[in-house]
């Protein structure tokens, strides 16, 4: 309802009203609108809707449940997290009960294990970590495929980079579109008997679909020359 319509309805009920009366009606309408907006429940895009569990509860979860816990939080709070990253000019944030309890402009400022445990103790919860996809990059060039333990076999590969201000990790990741996430189990890399490296002893990283959907590269898999060529369209950057 417009202010003019409201003023006319008041005039119809009370008869003639002067200019001050019209101003009063207009001001009252604005106040009622603000009150109505403030009372509306926040949508999942505007509010953090996930619940943090304690450190003990998190450590008791099986690995698959830990992954599901993080995936659910990312899916439910995607717009909220994006807004927080942009507002704070952050590359990563840690969240407890809808509050950003730690953040950083680069990965160099990421808490070490002792600092993270102190944060868990201070909040009484296990903070959820969200990292900007801009921290992760797929290099735009050609990568030779990795030979496997099987005869006449090779694994498609893509060159990736993970960077902070003062450090940069560049490696060739095996491309696995059958997996949603990326995998780099550091505790297993030192073991040659690890399932992670059973097919490719030199594997350092497994690249899943989620990053590819986010960064939207164009991949050309050449099964004759056995290399992967990466390029980006102008609209994907």
Image (cartoon, rainbow, N blue to C red):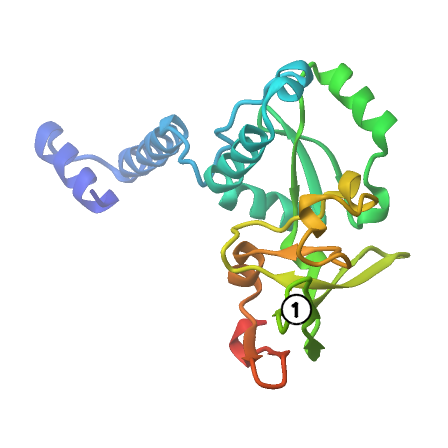
Residue at the image position 28 percent from the left and 40 percent from the top: 19
Q: Can you give x and y, in whole percent of width and height, for residue 151 in the image?
A: 64, 69
* Residue 137 image-quadrant placement: bottom right
Q: Quick one: label 1, few (<14), some, or many (20+) residues within 10 Å?
A: many
Q: Nearer the viewer, residue 72 or 150?
A: 150
Q: Nearer the viewer, residue 13 or 214?
A: 214
Tell whether 89 sits left or right of 179: right
Residue at the image position 14 percent from the left and 40 percent from the top: 8
Q: Can you give x and y, in whole percent of width and height, for residue 234 in the image?
A: 56, 80
Q: Nearer the viewer, residue 226 or 141?
A: 226
Does residue 89 show up? no
Counting every numbered tag in the picture gives 1
Q: Can you give x and y, in whole percent of width and height, for residue 86 in the image?
A: 64, 51
In the displayed structure, 121 sits above or below 207; it is above
In the displayed structure, 237 sits above or below 198; it is below
* Residue 188 image-quadrant placement: top right
Tell whether 81 sits left or right of 163: left
* Residue at the limit of the structure toward the right, as seen here: 166
Q: Quadrant of the N terminus?
A: top left
Q: Can you give x and y, in whole percent of width and height, for residue 237 in the image?
A: 59, 71
Tell whether 133 sits left or right of 164: left
Residue at the image position 50 percent from the left and 39 percent from the top: 77
In the displayed structure, 45 sits above or below 167; it is above
Which residue is under mark 1? 157
* Residue 66 image-quadrant placement: top right
Does residue 169 show up? yes
């Amino acid at each position: 309802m417009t202010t003019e319509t409201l003023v006319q309805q008041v005039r119809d009920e009370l008869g003639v009203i002067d200019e001050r009366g019209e101003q009063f009606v207009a001001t009252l309408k604005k106040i009622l609108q603000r009150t109505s907006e403030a009372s509306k429940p926040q949508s999942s895009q505007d509010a953090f809707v996930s619940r943090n569990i304690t450190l003990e509860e998190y450590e008791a979860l099986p690995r698959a449940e830990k992954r599901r816990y993080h995936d659910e939080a990312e899916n439910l709070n995607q717009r909220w997290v994006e807004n927080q990253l942009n507002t704070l000019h952050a590359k990563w944030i840690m969240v407890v009960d809808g509050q950003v309890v730690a953040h950083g402009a680069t990965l160099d400022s990421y808490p070490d294990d002792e600092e993270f445990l102190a944060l868990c103790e201070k909040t009484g919860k296990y903070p959820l970590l969200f990292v900007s996809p801009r921290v992760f990059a797929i290099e735009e060039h050609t990568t030779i495929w990795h030979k496997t333990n099987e005869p006449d076999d090779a694994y498609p590969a893509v060159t990736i980079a993970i960077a902070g201000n003062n450090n940069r990790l560049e490696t060739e990741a095996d491309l696995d579109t059958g997996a949603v996430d990326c995998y780099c189990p550091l505790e297993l890399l030192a073991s040659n008997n690890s399932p992670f490296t059973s097919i490719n002893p030199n594997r350092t990283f497994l690249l899943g679909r989620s990053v590819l959907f986010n960064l939207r590269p164009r991949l050309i898999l050449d099964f004759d020359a056995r290399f992967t060529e990466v390029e980006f369209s102008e609209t994907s950057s």
